[in-house]
Amino acid sequence: VSGSNAVGTGTGVLGDTKSLNTTLSSGVYYLQDNTRGSGIFTYDMSGYSFFPDFFLPGSLWKDSDNVLNAAKDKAAVDAHYYAGVTYDYYKNVFGRNSYDNKGAAIKSSVHYSSNYNNAFWNGSQMVYGDGDGTNFISFSGGIDVVGHELTHAVTEKSSNLVYQNESGALNESLSDIFGTLIEFYNGKNPDFEIGEDIYTPGTAGDALRSMSDPTKYGYPDNYSNRYTGTSDNGGVHTNSSIINKAAYLMSEGGTQYGVTVPAIGRDKMGAIFYRANTVYLTSNATFSQARAAAVQSAADLYGAGSAEVNAVNKAFDAVGVQ
Ligand SMILES: O=C(O)[C@H](CCc1ccccc1)CC1(C(=O)N[C@@H](Cc2c[nH]c3ccccc23)C(=O)O)CCCC1
Ligand SMILES: [Ca+2]
Ligand SMILES: [Ca+2]
Ligand SMILES: [Zn+2]
């Protein structure tokens, strides 16, 4: 909508208060943030569940008084706010202006379908379900989930890794890696777990995946244990854990299968994977090619004989990827 910039307040999925960039138009406030790129727009799908995709994005979220503290507001508040944090991360850390580096408008829809236990990037926008309330709560309540989804858009505009088999697992891992780095950038209860804030509200301390110990949830932490079947596009959400573990080891250090990896920290790990995604990886990249891309990226950034290059090699050794 066309109108004037406003700042509202809202309550998020976890009950936390945050300020929101909104737009005032004809006496109505909209979740339209004009301060970032071509804007961040958050829409309402109202739980409509009959062929919902046909109705995306839904209607631009409107509010009467710029105070979004009702129960149905929470998912919209977090989708809007965390999209802004994700925009800020890519802009401030890598100088990237939105997911296309050309300031593309960022669109999110919440209350997708009914009891929808997932979230996704559909090629044009982010879409969030509310969960069934037992297995999941509203997916936009997880900043690592929001960062994960928007990173699919970054990857699409960069390496464009094909969403199946090893390239698909790399695609998935990049989304978990940057979803996590965005969670650390935001600074609230950051961890190397995925989806912990929106998974099983009745159970504390669990998550969808763990980058620090994928085996906690039955996922592989080495190439020899990779899934080679066809479900989930060839196990893209399973084999991603192998690369996730390598990224974790690079960042935090550690030893597995007799290989010790020295820590280089989150920021350098992020810089290496960002350069790999935007400069070296091609759409059909294998895990082995990802190792080469990460090594080359580290060499470009820190020098051929650097401790960073050594850490990258050791990390991929530790997960059995040559
Ligand atoms: O973006 C993605 O990779 C996932 C998108 C999945 C999807 C793809 C196509 C159409 C609909 C949904 C969504 C997320 C995901 O990892 N989903 C996993 C785990 C999962 C979420 N809800 C589930 C319900 C049942 C089983 C598994 C799941 C999956 O779809 O496998 C990413 C972060 C959290 C949710
Ligand atoms: Ca997390
Ligand atoms: Ca839980
Ligand atoms: Zn994903």
Image: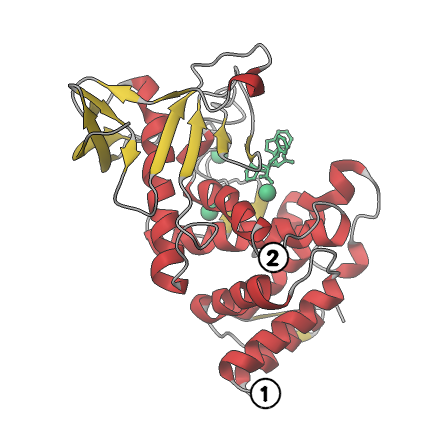
Residue 180's disc is: none
Query: What amino acid is found at the position of numbered circle 1 in the picture?
Result: Ala
Query: Looking at the image, which residue is at 34% across and 53% down?
Result: 88
Query: What amino acid is found at the position of numbered circle 2 in the picture?
Result: Asn
Depth check, front residue: 231 or 220: 231
- In this rendering, the answer to whether 59 lies above or below 198 is above
Point out residue 15 in the picture as x, y percentages from the top left corner. Answer: 29, 30
Q: Quadrant of the N terminus?
A: top left
Which of the two discs, 2 and 1, labels the residue nearer the N terminus? 2
User: Label 2 to label 1, Cα distance in Å?
Assistant: 23 Å
**In the structure shown, which secondary structural element does the residue marked by tag 2 occupy?**
helix
**In the structure shown, which secondary structural element does the residue marked by tag 1 occupy?**
loop
Q: Which residue lies furthest to the bottom in this view?
A: 305
Residue 244's disc is: 2
Query: Looking at the image, which residue is at 63% across and 68% down?
Result: 280
Q: Does the residue labelled 1 lie within 8 Å of ligand 4?
A: no
- The residue wearing badge 1 is 304
Point out residue 188 in the picture as x, y percentages from the top left corner. Answer: 33, 48
Whether residue 144 appears in this view of the structure is: yes
Depth check, front residue: 269 or 16: 269
* Label 1 neighbour load within 10 Å: few <14, some 14-19, many 20+: some
The answer to whether residue 153 is left or right of residue 245 is left
Whether residue 189 appears in this view of the structure is: no
Query: Looking at the image, which residue is at 38% across and 34% down?
Result: 79
Point out residue 235 in the picture as x, y percentages from the top left corner. Answer: 74, 44
Point out residue 110 in the picture as x, y percentages from the top left corner. Answer: 43, 25
- In this rendering, the answer to whether 294 lies above or below 73 is below
* Label 2 neighbour load within 10 Å: few <14, some 14-19, many 20+: many
